[in-house]
Amino acid sequence: MKYYSLNNPNEFVSFKEALTKGLAPDKGLYFPESIPVLGQGFIDILPYLSNTEIAYEVLKHFVGEEIPERDFKKIVEEAFDFELPTVALDSKTAVLELFHGPSMAFKDVGARFMAGCLSYFEKESFDGEDLHILVATSGDTGGAVAAGFYGKPGVKVHVLYPKGKVSEFQEHQLTSLGDNIYSYAVNGDFDKCQHIVKQAFIDPNINLSLSSANSINIGRWLSQMIYYFIAYKDLNNPKDLAISVPSGNFGNICAGLVAREMGLPIKQFIAATNANDTVVRFMETKLYAPNPTVATISNAMDVSNPSNFVRIQELLGGSLANFEAHSYSDAQAIEAISELYQDYNYVSEPHGAIAYLGLQKYLKQDPEARGLFLATAHPVKFMEVLPDHIQEKAAVGVAMPESQWPRPQHREIVDYASFVNSLESYVVS
Ligand SMILES: *Cc1c(COP(=O)(O)O)cnc(C)c1O
């Protein structure tokens, strides 16, 4: 499979190059040259395949000959080695839980798949020099990427997070792994972390081989399409399936749309957002006009200019058929968390609850449909915002970080120069 930049449809690169570069040199997102169609035969046998078999059969088309079968099977097995259960709430509504991985957010699968592929190529062409991955995180991404690369030879991960602006739970995840994972608490906000990373990429004085693990990377983006195949299988090949996806950067839902292009019969996709409603307004007015980003309690979706929207447009063209988008406030999300608990005894958190609201809205107008919404984070990660009577339920069965992890280790960063100092001292040591 070859990939082209959405800024230049005439130049193609290999899977390896698109994966290693992340973003094309012309700043365009990479997109597969064609979407393979799997045929009804494959859909019919889904119930007989394991999750890793499905992942292998689907994703092999996007990697082609570049990774040998044996190595690729191993990468897929490692990326999908935790449960992705579909839980039925009633005969019409089910929830796909994507939060049972090491960082308890759905980004684990994508991060692990990307880490597996990148480490494979790094090992193949290892010239004695480590690859350094720089990640700026507002909380969830850094934990998933760090866990994905933890212990991988030839790769070092540097995670920058805004000091005091991630939850205690997240800070433990970001700082206590050790080994090839280095953490930096930046005195500033997420934008400052991102700024430092961007500066490092263009700094001629840094003589390290640098890469990013951004969510637009094809390794992270494409592997998410497997969720949809797995849910379809677990629901026993349902007719008229509508899926609601809590969306921020729109990578996850865009992967779902690719799955549909490949032949997975999904009737409707619903993008559910928080107050950052650029796509919702676009669907109404056809004007793409991002507002400044608003902080919400579903903070992993606080994105006002979603990078993957250009991929959605490439995929669906101008029509955007069987795709809708709705936005919900913090108050509505909290109300939905209470409703899910009261009606179904189900413990949710703001991201999943927003997806639930989007699904409810759709099911009212299409009562024949089966509905699925995606739960992208473990409720315990958002304990602070859950109603009191639900908080204790959220923690049931979860080992809290204090007891699970050793003391956090990180360097304090005040500016770009102090980051470079720390980076260099880490690399030498
Ligand atoms: C990243 C994230 C999202 C949004 O996913 P996108 O692919 O960026 O749309 C939703 N929920 C949680 C918990 C996340 O971490």
Image: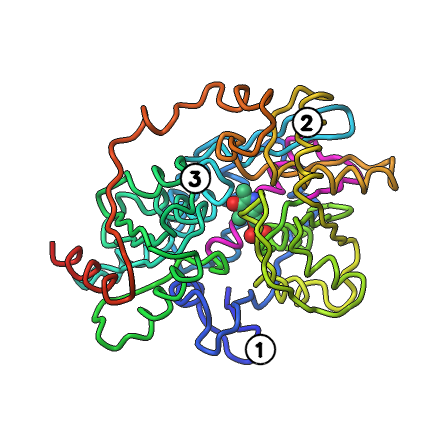
Asked which secondary structure carries label 1, the reply is: strand
Q: Which residue is mark 1?
A: 9
The residue to which callout 2 is attached is 338
Q: Position of residue 313 (x, y in %)?
A: 68, 66
Q: Left or right: where does residue 2 sit relative to residue 306? A: left
Q: Who comes first in sequence, dot 2 or dot 1?
A: 1
Q: CA distance from mark 1 to mark 3?
A: 41 Å
User: Is 123 left or right of 424, judged from the image as shown?
Assistant: right
Near-viewer residue (346 or 57): 346
Q: Residue at x 60, y 41 (%)?
A: 351
**Marks 2/1: CA–CA distance:** 48 Å
> Does residue 135 belong to the magenta stretch?
no
For the record, the magenta segment spans 219-244
Nearer to the camera, 162 or 108: 162
Nearer-the-camera pick, 83 or 167: 167
The reply to whether residue 116 is visible in this rendering is yes
Q: Secondary structure at mark 2?
A: helix
**Label 3, on which residue?**
167
